[in-house]
Every structure is written in C-alpha cells, then in structure tokens.
Image (spheres, grey):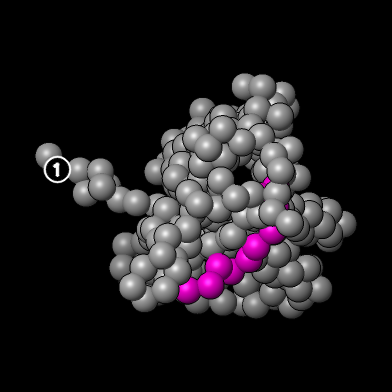
Amino acid sequence: MRNPWRNFDWNVRTCGWHGHVTWAPSEDALAERLHVDTVDGEAWRCLRCASFVPGEPAGHGPAEDAPLVLRGRALRDAFVLRLLAVERGIRGVLLVALAYGIYKFEGAQDSLQRVFEDYLPRLSAVAQHAGVDLQSTGPVHLIQKALSTDPHTLTLISLGVLAYGALELLEAVGLWLMRRWGEYVAVVGTAVFIPLEVYELVERVTWLRVVAFALNVFAVVYILWTKRLFGFRGGRSAFEAERHSASLLEVERAAAGLSSSAPTRA
C-alpha cells in the first residue's frame, strides 16, 4: 500500500503555518552559503525548510546567537508532545470538574439521599413492567455506595482527584511548552499510575482501560527515548548535541569548515 506520509515534510508544513526563519550570520563564509542574489534582490536561506526566501533576513549577528530552529524529527517529536499535552489537558480539566462535583455532592448528600429513597421505589415499579430489575443494576449500586460513603472520605477523595487533575494540567503545560521539567513530570507522573492500571486490567478488561494503558505506556517510552531523560541514551548533553547536529546552521558551518571561534565581519 502507498504510504501517504512517505513524502510528508515537517519542515515545510511548519514554515507554512508559522513562516520562515532567516538569519544573516556575521561570518563571511557562512553568510555566503546562506545568501544568494536574485533578479528580485537578495534572498536568505530558511533555517528550517532550507528554502531561499526573498527579502531582508529576520535577524543577523554571530551564528552562535541565531535561534536554534527545530527541524525534521525534532518537529515530529514536538507535534507528538503537543498531542499528548492536549490529551493531558482535557483529562486534567475533567478531573478538576469531577473533584468539584464530588465536593458539591458532599454538601447535598442528605438531600440526594432523600430524593433517591423517595423516587427509587416508583421507578422500580415502572421498570418491572419493562422486565428490568432496577435494584440490581450497576448505576443504582454505585449511587447507593456513594450515598452511604462517609463525608470525611468524600472530602479526601475530592482532594485526591483535584491533586491528580492539577498534576495532569501541569504535565499539559510543560509538554505544550516543550520544557524539560514538563517531560520529567509527565514521565514520572504517568509511570507512577501504570501499576494501578495493570491491576485494573487484571481485575477487569475494558476497551477504555486498554486504550488508557496503551497511551500511557507509549507516552512514557516515547518521551524517555526521544528526550533522553534520567541520563538515558547519553542524557541531556547527547540530546542537545543531537538538536545541534540537525540544525541547518550547524550543518552549513561544518561544510564551510568553520568553528564557533571563526573570525567575524568588522
């Protein structure tokens, strides 16, 4: 089958969305490799997609001061991290809303108990005509269990759910901004709950639990592998070296035989 992603260019896609990134380095030999004269005037090579862009460069100065632009696989990794950030953000918002719901439920527990006791017998009579034993259904058992829960226990549950929701939102912010601390929080915060998810799967397998478990394992392994956390695959120094090796400016500097201490223009 034909792979629709085979010719997909993350660099061109990102430049299409956010615009080109051009830089005029002070080093003469490097500037010559990034600059051309055309019939329409000068053009500078984009540091992301490598296209020559007509007009003045967006910035200028020593090459070491140029922005480190994500390219290729780094852009793909950023896209995946932001997808995970969106998922974590949605989950965090839902958990915070659930914590608020539990808190409000605690305050109205007595009133809800009376409503449940008044209306359940009436609904049960109607359900029996349809051949449904309402008393034995799962939702009714869940409601009865919640109504009989001690208010202090509900408070602890609400605080626990709120803390978990806050952790998910913190992960979402860190992953979206692509901060290294956010990657650490995401890996640790997700890995801690994987044993609990395994226990839930052993207890009962559902498609929702399977999807959640697979997504969390993927997130931990992917971030750990690509971001080289906890010293893995050389740690931060190897990660930074990999980013620089993919930089167009670094590639052209190496091709021109320049070092970071090369002489600059007057």
User: Looking at the image, is 245 positioned above or below residue 155?
Assistant: above
For residue 193, say whether it is visible.
no
- Locate residue 54: give its quadrant: bottom left
* Disc 1 residue type (three-letter): Arg
* Image x and y of residue 63, in percent: 66, 50
Q: Residue furthest right?
A: 152
Residue at image position (56%, 32%) is 257
User: Looking at the image, is 55 positioned above or below residue 64?
Assistant: below
For residue 112, say whether it is visible.
yes
Choose between 90 and 123: the one closer to the eye. Answer: 90
* Image x and y of residue 255, in percent: 50, 35
32 part of magenta stretch: no
- Locate residue 180: give its quadrant: top right
* Image x and y of residue 98, in percent: 67, 64
- Locate residue 59: give its quadrant: bottom right
Image: magenta residue range? 55-64
56 part of magenta stretch: yes
Choose between 229 and 165: the one closer to the eye. Answer: 229
Residue at image position (21%, 49%) is 4
Counting the numbered discs, the total is 1
User: Looking at the image, is 44 positioned above or below residue 164?
Assistant: below
Image quarter in which the N terminus is found: top left
Q: Secondary structure at mark 1?
A: loop
Q: Residues within 10 Å of mark 1 (few under 14, many from 20)?
A: few
Q: Residue furthest front?
A: 266
Residue at image position (45%, 69%) is 42
Choose between 265 and 108: the one closer to the eye. Answer: 265
Image quarter in which the C terminus is found: bottom right
Residue at image mark 1:
2
* Image x and y of residue 46, in percent: 47, 58
